[in-house]
Image: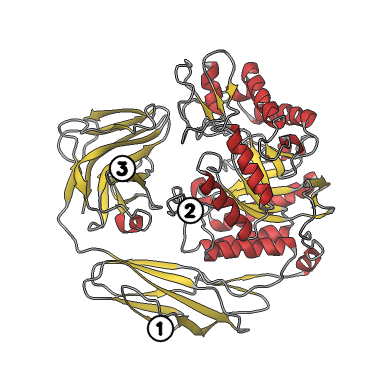
Amino acid sequence: MKMRYLALGAAVLLALTGAAVPTGVAPAFVTRAGADLRLHGKPFRFAGTNNYYLHYQSPVARDNVLDTAAAAGFQVMRTWGWFDTGTADGSNPTAGSQNGVYLQYWDGSGHPHYNDGADGLARLDAVIARAGQDGLKLVIPFTNNWGDFGGMDKYVEWAGGSHHDDFYTDARIRGWFRDYIAHLLDRTNSITGVKYKDDPTIMTWELANEPRCVGSGKYPRSAACDTDTITAWADEMSTFIRSVDRKHLISVGDEGFFADQPGGDDWTHNGGEGIDTVRLARLRNIDVMSYHLYPDGWGKTADWGTQWILDHARAARQVGKPVMLGEFGYRDKATRNTVYQRWTDAAYASGTNGALYWILSDRLDDGSLYGDYDGFTVYCPSPVCTTISNFGRRMQGRALTFAPVADDDTATVEYGMSTSLQVVGNDLVYLPARRLDLRTLKLNPDATGGTFTVGAGGTVAFTPAAGFTGRATVTYTIADNLGRRSNRATVTVTVKPQPLPEQTLFDFEDGTQGWGPASFNPTAGTVATTSEFHADGVQGLRLTGTDGGWFGASLPAPTDLTTRGTLSFASPSANGSFAVSFQTGPDSVWCQGDARPSATRAGYYELDLTAVAAGCPGLSDVRTVNLYIGGNQQQDIDAMTIS
């Protein structure tokens, strides 16, 4: 992989005028001056991250994330400002809560209610208070386009609506949403004593997270929903917010889709999702153009992502307003470091005001890391976190150049096999350095699981110890041609266990074999046997997502998956993607890891259990297997085995 270089130029020198604010200066609001953001009267450009669980996980988990973000030098955190619960008939007002936490609920009385207590908005109070203590600014959306934690479809459900976009057009729903916004803006923080609308810790209110005409699938879009629909809604809501709160920035929170190619084939430019990011940014009471970047899910490339950043910087200049990349993520860990370097370099050089990666998580109360459930997590400290931190320092004008960033590398081999890894291809150097000095590649004396040696051309060879299975590791450093030495990066080689005979977990020949919605999401959907799809025998299992969620079943006996390499199951090859989780031990501890099954052969999905093992310490005692099915989706499976 070609090494990437970070360009330095006149723009970098200009950024040095935005010096850091001295310690002890009172908190101030981030304000807009034309296309610039300002803090304490000086230009404000920033790097940061996102986290969605701050308000419903424990205080320890919350503080760990915020403290780690501050320690990494991030300036801004984006986090959720909604959690909506309650069944449509009002019989279970807290249905959908997590850890007993919910912010807004429905009891069937005709209007949503607000939970101002310790298990409600007091949780958001604590997030804001801790962020302020850590010197972080917050970006807070008021609701979600997607079904996570309630969001738009929950309002539609409460109102008895039939389309996702009823959220934007139904007068009663719009009134409920304005009322919720007003309740938050006028709320007095129970910890700081400051009203939300008067709190400088909050930088930006976002109308929603990723609004579109289409949601998670529980409700379809109507034929009438288009860019006019969402633009009119955004105009109404931003005008309402400004009438109550004149101190904070307002943004839409959209993904930045253009409508400059109507009728075209490129869905990110044809307005088909109901978003015209330029029209939205031009609205009188919108201060900041927003956009997101996810090539994996959008059918795009990393290089396309670089152009996406440049396109939005140019569009924002034409509108005359600031622009923030509110979320960005890239799943391929082997190239993520170099991709993020290219993206952040483009953001810096193009004048983008700030960029927030998805997602920073941290340790829970028991010391374990919150899982990388969507494959985008960048923990701190880590090499990629260092790359983002360096970007933040450049945005603040605190540094021009840095030591090399060596990135982690991984490989998987069959039992007893050796391998060689090219470890420097995803490492970064910063000008004025021109290259890495391969002669300085140094392995540290901390190897486990076998023998690691330095080879030619930046390679590291590995030979496993006799009988070894599991994860073998060594750390290394390397210097650039100016003699600046990198951080420690970790090389991990996973040696698969010896192959064992295939074992069938579920074949569904005698029924559903205990499969159903997980106990914590009983409205996820339904299960039934089907003769329309089967890999073996005469029938398989059909999982139908209503609200969507986790489906699973207990295994006949506790099963040790640490001695297995692969979990596989049959499913129609075009039937979608899956997430797999396990529940382990007598206490059913959740175990998911960051690996997802992939379609490796026609009609089958396979999950590499060795990739899961790092995030699942209880994999030796698996009691339950689960699959995630989205709302309004139907998935058929059969012949689930381990080998």
Q: Secondary structure at mark 1?
A: loop
**How many marks are shown on the rendered structure?**
3
Residue at the spot 22% in from the left edge and 75% down from the top edge: 466
Q: Residue 627: x and y, percent?
A: 34, 40
Q: Residue 238: x and y, percent?
A: 73, 31
Q: Is residue 609 left or right of residue 272?
A: left
The image quarter in which residue 259 lies:
top right
Contact check, label 2 and label 3, Cβ < 8 Å: no
The image quarter in which residue 155 lies:
top right
The quadrant of the image that shows the C terminus is bottom left
Residue at the spot 22% in from the left edge and 31% down from the top edge: 512
Local packing at callout 2 (Cα closer than 10 Å; few below 14, some 14-19, many 20+) is some
Q: Secondary structure at mark 2?
A: loop
Tell me the tag on residue 263: none
Contact check, label 3 and label 1, Cβ < 8 Å: no
Tell me the tag on residue 363: 2
Query: The disc labelled 3 sits on which kind of residue?
Result: Asp
Which residue bears the numbered disc 3?
Answer: 587
Q: Is residue 263 visible?
A: no
Q: Is residue 619 visible?
A: yes
Contact check, label 1 and label 2, Cβ < 8 Å: no
Which residue bears the numbered disc 1?
Answer: 455
Q: Is residue 630 left or right of residue 83?
A: left
Between residue 538 and residue 49, name the one nearer to us: 49
**First-in-chain label (2 vs 3):** 2
The image quarter in which residue 46 lies:
bottom right
| Distance CA(mark 2)–CA(mark 3) | 20 Å
Q: Residue 348: x and y, percent?
A: 70, 60
Local packing at callout 1 (Cα closer than 10 Å; few below 14, some 14-19, many 20+) is some
| Distance CA(mark 1)–CA(mark 2) | 36 Å
Between residue 119 and residue 269, name the one nearer to us: 119
Query: The disc labelled 1 sits on which kind of residue?
Result: Gly
